[in-house]
Image (cartoon, rainbow, N blue to C red):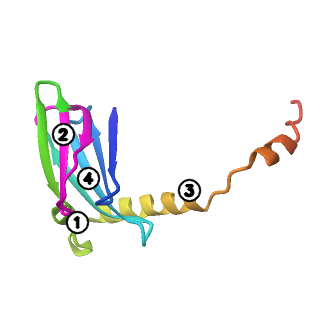
Amino acid sequence: FNHVCFDPKRNMLVVANSRTSAMYCLVYRPEMAAFVALAEYELAMPILSLTIGETDDSEKVPIFCVQTQSIQHYTVSVATSEASEEGMSSAETFWRSQVSSAIASAAAATFPTKTEEASASPPAPV
């Protein structure tokens, strides 16, 4: 299972995978409509639940986690999570381009309004 939290103040998406005992921090840049960094943290125990705490520090993200044997407080640095593109592996670069493409496609998608849905003809019988 994946657990997801977004911190709009720092534009960081935190994803915890309880099956692999890993936590991922993705830094989002709205002006680029793209995730610009991905940091993976291996954990000793799986995360069952998480939330992002409040702080005045714009570079630190406090993360509170309920794990199988404890409750933890992690502090993740936004600067540490942001890796330069030169340091990215080809898999990370590919993943970043795929995520950016998916976000761009979703942003460009149009959804029918209630009026359009009501006037749409039903599908033909098969």
Q: Which residue is mark 1?
A: 82
Residue range corresponding to the magenta coloring: 44-65
Q: Are marks 3 and 4 in contact (CB under 8 Å)?
A: no
Q: Are marks 1 and 2 in contact (CB under 8 Å)?
A: no
Asked whether residue 46 is drawn in magenta, I would say yes
Residue 42 image point, x, y percent: 15, 44
C-alpha separation, residue under disc 4 versus residue under disc 1: 9 Å
Residue 44 image point, x, y percent: 10, 35
| Secondary structure beneath label 1 | loop
> What residue type is disc 1 on?
Glu
Q: Which residue is mark 4?
A: 25
C-alpha separation, residue under disc 3 versus residue under disc 1: 24 Å
Q: Which mark is residue 64?
A: 2
Upstream in sequence: badge 3 or badge 2? 2
Instruction: Relative to 53, say whether 37 is above or below.
Output: below
Q: In this rendering, which labeled residue sits more in front, label 1 or label 2? A: 2
- State left or right for residue 19 relative to residue 79: right
Q: Which residue is mark 3?
A: 106
